[in-house]
Amino acid sequence: MTDKMSAADFLARAVEFLPLHNGPRFPEIRLHHASIAFELATKAAILHGGGTHAECLHARHDLETAIKIARRRGFACTLEARGAATQLTGYYRTHRLADLARVRPAQVLERLCDLAAAHVWDVNAWMREKRSCQQNGGLVDRQPSASPVINDERFFGIVQRNIFPFFNADNQCEKKSH
């Protein structure tokens, strides 16, 4: 028996860390939770793409490095998520998110939280699609993950009830313009 987390475990933890829409209004806490969710979702993508726990450990709290590894493993990260990773990494990996909260306007900070939620959503969708293709004889990867992923109904329910109200009734992420 192993004590290492699976891709699905990382993704489930990412969902748990997403900042609640009606949660603490302290920006540094919201940013910290959003950054953790972003990190865990990206590590789920690494593992689901056939990556190793060593690659996850190598990335540590560097969101940009984690995205680079996940992209090499087949995850097509959005430009918006890469931009959020760039903005968060310097502060997150050095435990200085309070500094970021002091220098950015509130709407920028909320946008970073929104982008983290969208990134978690994108990783979940990619894992479901990849798993579906593997089960149907489509894609065959080097080391496909056997982990179950969060089903859309459960994931959307969590997002709709607790997190950010930018998902519409069709489970589509609505892009906000700030």
Image: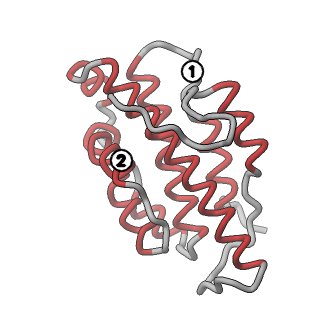
- Tell me the kind of residue under disc 2: Glu
Q: Earlier in the sequence, mark 2 or mark 1?
A: 1
x then y, percent, for residue 124? 63, 54
In screen coordinates, is 104 left or right of 72?
left
What residue did someone put label 1 on? 21
In screen coordinates, is 171 left or right of 29?
right
Give the answer, above or below, for where 149 lies relative to 176: below
Provide the secondary structure element on which disc 2 rests: helix
Q: In which quarter of the image is residue 17?
A: top right
Provide the secondary structure element on which disc 1 rests: loop
In which quadrant is the N terminus drawn? bottom right
Kindly identify the residue that appears in the image at 47 percent across and 35 percent down.
34
Q: Which of marks 2 and 1 is in front?
A: 2
Most foreground residue, 23 or 158: 158
- Tell me the kind of residue under disc 1: His
Kindly identify the residue that appears in the image at 54 percent across and 50 percent down.
40
Whole-number angstrom distance, CA of label 2 to CA of label 1: 20 Å
Most foreground residue, 41 or 139: 139
Most foreground residue, 165 or 102: 165
Q: Quadrant of residue 60?
A: bottom left
Kindly identify the residue that appears in the image at 34 percent across and 47 percent down.
85
In which quadrant is the C terminus drawn? top left
In screen coordinates, is 159 left or right of 94?
right
x then y, percent, for residue 146? 74, 72
What residue did someone put label 2 on? 80
x then y, percent, for residue 75? 49, 67
x then y, percent, for residue 76? 45, 65
